[in-house]
Image (spheres, rainbow, N blue to C red):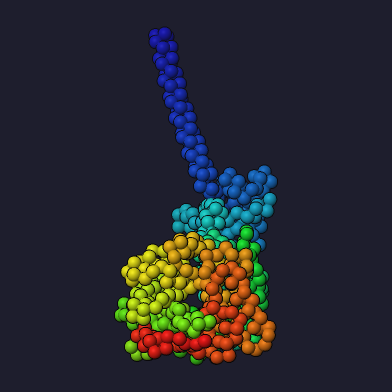
Amino acid sequence: MHAFFIACESVACLVSWRANEDALNRERATQTASQRVNRDLNEAQTLAKVGSWDWEVGSDIIWWSPQLYTLTGRDPERFTPGAESFLQLVHDDDRPRVRALLEAAVAKPGETGLAYECRLVRPDGAVVVVHCLGRWVRVGEKAPTSMVGTCQDITERHALQRAMEHQALHDSLTGLGNRALFLDRLDHALTLHKRSGAALSVLFIDLDDFKTVNDGLGHGKGDEILAEVGHRLQAEVRASDTVARLGGDEFAVLLEDTDVERAVEVAERIRDAVHAPMSLGDHLVSIQASMGIAPAVSSTTSPEVLRDADIAMYAAKEAGQGGCEVFTTAMRASVINRTQLREELNNALKLDQFVLHFQPVVNQQTGVVEAVEALVRWEHPERGLVPPADFIPLAEDTGLIVALGQWVTEQAARQTKALQRQLGVPLWVSVNLSPQQLCSDVVGMVRRALDASGLDARDLVLEITESTLLNHEGAIQQLETLRAEGVRVAVDDFGTGYSSLSYLRKLPVDVLKIDRSFVDCINDGPDEAAMVEAIIKLAHTLGLRTIAEGIETDEQDVTLRRLGSDAGQGYHLCRPLPAEALLDRLRERPRISA
């Protein structure tokens, strides 16, 4: 019996031991699971750059997770978390706002949580942007006394957002503001202007002939020019002024507290700064800018002020490159007319409204007409004969100039061939090429015109201004190809650009056309005549033929013949005429002068 009790006691001890062991194992498993959860939570917070906190509001005791110490760069052994100590970590500019949010939350426990962004300053001075969330913890029906929450490091996201906002409002090439930013700044300035009457002016800037330079030097160099212009504009205005690139080669400047008189002075400084030579590798480039100024008035909106400045800029372009005009209401009517003309121009070629007039080129030694220059005219059904100065710039702006130039070349070749047959005399024709045409397939265009008309290649001369020729290196190869086939090249308006003897020797040129500005004053004195004589001798030395443009008087014609000019054209000799009228004129008077 004693042994039986001993055995039972042993069994009971074994059962108790196993029960204790099972409980211990369960406790260990629970601890392991809890440790795993804490570890996973810590890893997740670390990956998400999130720190958590628990705030006993009444006692101002705050518990921080390890990640929150890491995020703020504070040592858990030295830093005691609390509402006030946390506020001391907040950036000075953000602290009043965050303090107000905390006070509002404490004032209404259970009602107002927390949700805000702020900047925290680490001990090394680095700034961390955080997004903080907090909610009250309720226990039963009593008002909550504790709040739990998180702080997440959003510095990278905030920087990306700022970069995207900057990109949306700034030009990537120049770093200047873009149109959206400019109009926003102008809106604020106009609001102040309407409230206080402070002066306000907008300056609209457009680079003259930039497309010619861009196409000639390449878009890479063109971008360098735009960036340099942006830098020069900023250097000429105050830090409080706004400079923006609106697109392409258009810029704008917002001048606050600036009346029109002062704005004109700023524009003159900008003009001089932009025109100063720019060094682009092997190239030294000088460009000009046309500018328009629009003062703000109480009835205008920001788009209207910018539009008026744009209108004034176009008026400056029409008055001459590199100028500046102040907006007037009369300019708006002119622009409306220009806009209507632009729309009508797009259909003019389709409706066959263009015609050619021909101005004779007279041999000044024999008086015989040796050539004609083809000049395009627009016969508008309502406006009558529209002057070329009114529609050629529009054709260039719209890109229609390429198609129009092709039509002119084809018609000039065809009609000149007909004049040759009807007159029975040698006759060649010159056709003007625009800068945009030089960027297209000039060789193909000319070949098609010659093949269709039967005109000999030697009877076609292509006229190009010297600045255009020098700025289109790629076009020189096309001209050389055509010259090898017999087509000749003339430099139009010679003497008004910046060509030199070294350039002239390298260019594929056969004819120099002496600009009318030299002919106008040829009899004003010996110096003026000497200048024209020097041009003629230079051309003859290089084996080139000369044509004097714009001869208006018999005295000019006589002087040019005495100086050795080969040929001339102008109203004194013969006005431009349609082909049929020219044919009748030449049948009556084959000799015009000499």
Q: Nearer the viewer, residue 508 or 475?
A: 508
In the rendered image, the vertical position of residue 65 relative to residue 257, given as above or below: above
Residue 145 visible in the picture: no
Q: Nearer the viewer, residue 462 or 234?
A: 462
Task: Tell me which residue sits at (38%, 81%) in the image.
Answer: 356
State the residue at coordinates (43%, 26%).
22
Whether residue 492 is visible here, answered yes or no, is yes
Q: Is residue 222 above or below residue 182?
A: above
Residue beneath the point at 34% across and 77% down: 421
Q: Residue at x 42, y 88 (%)?
A: 589
Q: In the picture shown, does residue 250 fall above or below 87?
A: below
**Figure quadrant of residue 403:** bottom left
Residue 540 is situated, as x and y percent measured from the top left of the image, at 59, 72
Which residue is at the far left? 351
Percent position (x, y) of residue 326?
57, 86
Residue 274 percent coordinates (x, y): 63, 72
Which corner quadrant holds the N terminus? Answer: top left
